[in-house]
Amino acid sequence: MRSMTSEKDFRIEGDKLIRYLGDASNVKIPEGVRMIGEGAFKDDTTLISVTIPEGCEGIEEGAFQWCSALEIVHAPDLIMAVGLNAFAGTRFDQYYSENETSWNEDFCFLGKVLYKGRRSLREARIPEGTVRITADAFREHVLLRKISIPSTCIEIGWRAFESCTGLTEVTVPGNAKILGWHAFRGCSRLADRYLQDAKSWQMQKDIS
């Protein structure tokens, strides 16, 4: 196992990273990559840290799934989309799911994408500039009472607020967006009137 990477370790088509072929523990993705493809690093158990280059805008579904040793992700501010299960089964995901007492902020962001919210929040005002809320970002956050979603948000991911049983009020932007499957399922105290603006949102198809 090597500590660093070389150019030949990457299979790149155009500006998309299709597959990482190396075995380094610390990976720096080459400049010019704008998209990290589906499953590009999947099942790489030697990967510990990854640096995503400036200019990269998206991470597709399962890109780092089951990279069990991955704990450090350096992401640029331009990230606009993070796919379903992109970091599932990693130490990075586990940390932001279970160790929130050591967080410096109430939210974990990857670029402009809200990845996780602090479980102890009772009222969450998501910052302007946020473009997406990932799948499961607030799932089963039972203490959450109110959430304010900014006008810049274009998508709420799958199960993002599922089983937030204490949730009573949601402020959503008025223009049409994308609402992930079961985004508010199990929010038993949430009155329909708080989701009026979401009625016209495009509903993502359940492919589970």
Image: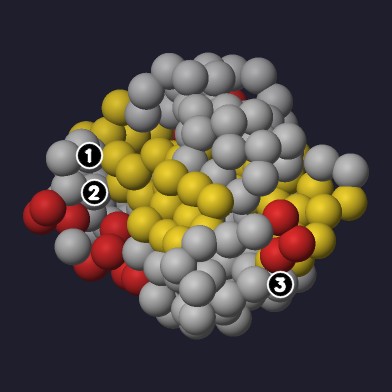
Q: Residue 147: horizontal and vertical position, in percent?
A: 33, 34
Horizontal arrangement in the rendering, residue 106 relative to residue 109 (left or right): left
Snapshot quadrant of residue 156: top right
Callout in the foreground (2, 3)? 3
| Above/below status of 2 relative to 54 | below
- Residue situated in front as seen by the camera: 145 or 46: 46
Which residue in the structure is indicated by mark 3?
21
Which residue appears at 58% of the width and 31% of the height? Answer: 54
Q: Can residue 33 be spotted in the picture?
A: yes
Q: CA distance from mark 1 to mark 2?
A: 5 Å
Q: Can residue 86 be spotted in the picture?
A: no
Going by the numbered disc 3, the residue's amino acid type is Leu
Of callouts 3 and 1, the N-terminal one:
3
Q: Which mark is residue 197?
A: none
Q: Residue 192: horizontal and vertical position, in percent?
A: 48, 40
Q: CA distance from mark 2 to mark 3?
A: 35 Å
Snapshot quadrant of residue 155: top right
Which residue appears at 70% of the width and 26% of the height? Answer: 176
Which residue in the structure is indicated by mark 1?
106
Going by the numbered disc 1, the residue's amino acid type is Asp
Q: CA distance from mark 3 to mark 1?
A: 36 Å
Which residue in the structure is indicated by mark 2?
118
Going by the numbered disc 2, the residue's amino acid type is Arg
| Above/below status of 101 relative to 2 | above
Q: Residues within 10 Å of mark 1 (few under 14, many from 20)?
A: some
Residues marked 1 and 2 touching at CB (< 8 Å)? yes
Of callouts 2 and 3, the N-terminal one:
3
